[in-house]
Image: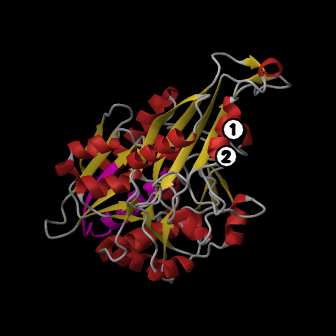
């Protein structure tokens, strides 16, 4: 039956691609309420796909903002594992739209690539899961039980998801979660992600005078909030690029020799990062390799600055206030609430009495780490090796996927985190694309995975 399923997947590639084009053409941008009808349309498209696969209890559940799609098939029996497949149908905004070569919601083939917003992140990964299940279901039946949880808020931080999971623990009960919201290092290097960084995101706001001042009349008498904010931010790293917030590293796990050796297998040296980013040289915490810095070490970065006159030409003012948006990527065991308190202590110690200040919490989520010897991870590793002919590499991901930690804490299940996108897919940027030969291999790997389980 497995060979029949693989052959089905190969024979139906054109249909699979057409279905991918159909969902990519729906502008399901979650951050902008203008697109709410399209969000609903995308949710209904996913629900229709599940019904077409013979899933039971398919429902589009409303939440405080965007709906969650659920479906299940429990016909394999109680003695077989139950896999919860997670995904999201929402996408990032397309701005700046003028940088797109072709319209972002008109999926376009150029060579081996399909271009369009969401083609890789993560509509392509959701459709890969749907089509792998289709191949197995149409050629002898599913060997495992399935549940589906496809949300519409991932690109805005999944604000409704934790409550939905907590309120539906029995509905979502499973043995493992398959989460294809990750990616591969290269087209010939299958990858399993086993750790994700968390996030703590803040606004730091400084206020000086009660209105903008003439910089000639008042310069040298009144402390400039913009200057002071720059000084405070500069002091958040020392000469070794360590973060100076009090207690920031107290809970950080150190890497052992075995894990450092596994990470060293990744083909992600300095040249890799320079090529991906276009920078002339790398920067980072002393004592760690680039791949360790991006996955296994915490960070603190300024994501935005605002102060004073930023229009064309000159306007000589001392601004009344200044603001910085600051994010910290966290590693396992770090607590976003503790990082918030750490930032408050830093400000209390270092901000002068000549300005007032506040720190506003915007969002946050814990990091997660999974057991690389989990039965489902082994099943996926063997599946990828069957398709690519080589043992996959294991990596820590620098970004955040909050649902992985929520699955651990709320459902007590581990996730298998994979995906078939590539580093140059332009995620969140103009000209997002999906490399189809890799995607087709990914569908076959998922077929193997279900049988391996």
Q: Which quadrant holds residue 253?
A: bottom left
Label 2 to label 1: alpha-carbon separation: 7 Å
Q: Residue furthest right?
A: 313
Query: Which of the marked residues, 2 or 1, is nearer the chain's N terminus?
Result: 1
* Residue 393 percent location from the top left of the image: 50, 76
Which residue occupies the foreground of this view, 117 or 240?
Answer: 240
- Residue 289: x %, y % from top left: 60, 72
320 or 162, which is in the foreground? 320
Residue 96 image label: 1
Q: Is 333 a magenta residue?
A: no
Q: Which residues are magenta?
A: 122-149
Within 10 angstroms of label 1, few (less than 14), some, or many (20 or more) residues? Answer: few
Q: Is residue 140 above or below residue 219?
A: below
Front position in the image: 151 or 299: 299
Residue position marked by numbered label 2 in the rendering: 430
Q: Residue at x 36, y 67 (%)?
A: 370
- What colour scheme has been applied to the protein in the rendered image? secondary structure
Q: Quadrant of residue 112?
A: bottom right
Look at the numbered disc 1 and give the secondary structure of its residue. Answer: loop
Contact? badges 2 and 1 (CB < 8 Å): yes
Residue drawn where x is 50% and y is 66% of the image: 296
């Amino acid at each position: 039956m497995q060979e029949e399923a693989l052959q089905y997947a190969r024979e139906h590639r054109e249909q699979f691609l057409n279905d991918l084009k159909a969902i990519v053409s729906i502008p399901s941008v979650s951050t902008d309420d203008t697109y709410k009808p399209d969000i609903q349309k995308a949710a209904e498209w996913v629900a229709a796909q599940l019904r077409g696969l013979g899933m039971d209890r398919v429902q589009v559940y409303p939440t405080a903002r965007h709906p969650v799609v659920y479906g299940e098939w429990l016909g394999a029996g109680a003695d077989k594992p139950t896999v919860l497949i997670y995904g999201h149908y929402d996408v990032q905004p397309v701005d700046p739209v003028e940088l797109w070569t072709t319209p972002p919601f008109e999926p376009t083939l150029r060579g081996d690539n399909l271009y369009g917003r969401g083609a890789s992140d993560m509509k392509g990964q959701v459709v890969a899961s749907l089509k792998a299940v289709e191949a197995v279901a149409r050629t002898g039946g599913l060997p495992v039980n399935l549940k589906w949880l496809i949300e519409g808020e991932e690109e805005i931080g999944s604000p409704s998801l934790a409550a939905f999971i907590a309120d539906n623990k029995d509905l979502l009960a499973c043995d493992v979660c398959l989460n294809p919201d990750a990616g591969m290092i290269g087209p010939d290097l299958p990858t399993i992600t086993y750790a994700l960084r968390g996030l703590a995101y803040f606004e730091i706001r400084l206020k000086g005078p009660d209105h903008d001042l003439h910089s000639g009349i008042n310069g040298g008498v009144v402390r400039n909030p913009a200057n002071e904010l720059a000084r405070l931010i500069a002091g958040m790293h020392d000469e070794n690029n360590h973060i100076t917030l009090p207690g920031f590293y107290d809970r950080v796990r150190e890497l052992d020799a075995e894990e450092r050796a596994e990470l060293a297998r990744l083909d992600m040296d300095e040249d890799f990062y320079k090529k991906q980013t276009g920078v002339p040289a790398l920067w980072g915490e002393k004592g760690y390799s680039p791949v360790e810095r991006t996955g296994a070490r915490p960070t603190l970065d300024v994501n935005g600055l605002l102060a004073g006159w930023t229009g064309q030409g000159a306007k000589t003012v001392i601004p009344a206030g200044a603001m910085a948006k600051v994010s910290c990527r966290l590693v396992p065991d770090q607590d976003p609430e503790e990082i918030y308190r750490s930032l408050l202590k830093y400000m209390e110690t270092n901000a002068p009495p000549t300005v007032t200040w506040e720190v506003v919490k915007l969002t946050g989520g814990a990091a997660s780490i999974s057991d690389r010897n989990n039965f489902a991870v082994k099943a996926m590793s063997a599946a990828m090796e069957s398709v690519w002919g080589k043992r996959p590499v294991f990596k820590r991901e620098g970004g955040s996927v909050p649902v992985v930690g929520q699955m651990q804490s709320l459902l007590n299940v581990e996730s298998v985190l994979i995906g078939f996108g590539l580093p140059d897919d332009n995620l969140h940027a103009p000209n997002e694309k999906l490399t189809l030969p890799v995607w087709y291999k990914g569908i076959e790997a998922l077929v193997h995975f279900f049988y391996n389980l």
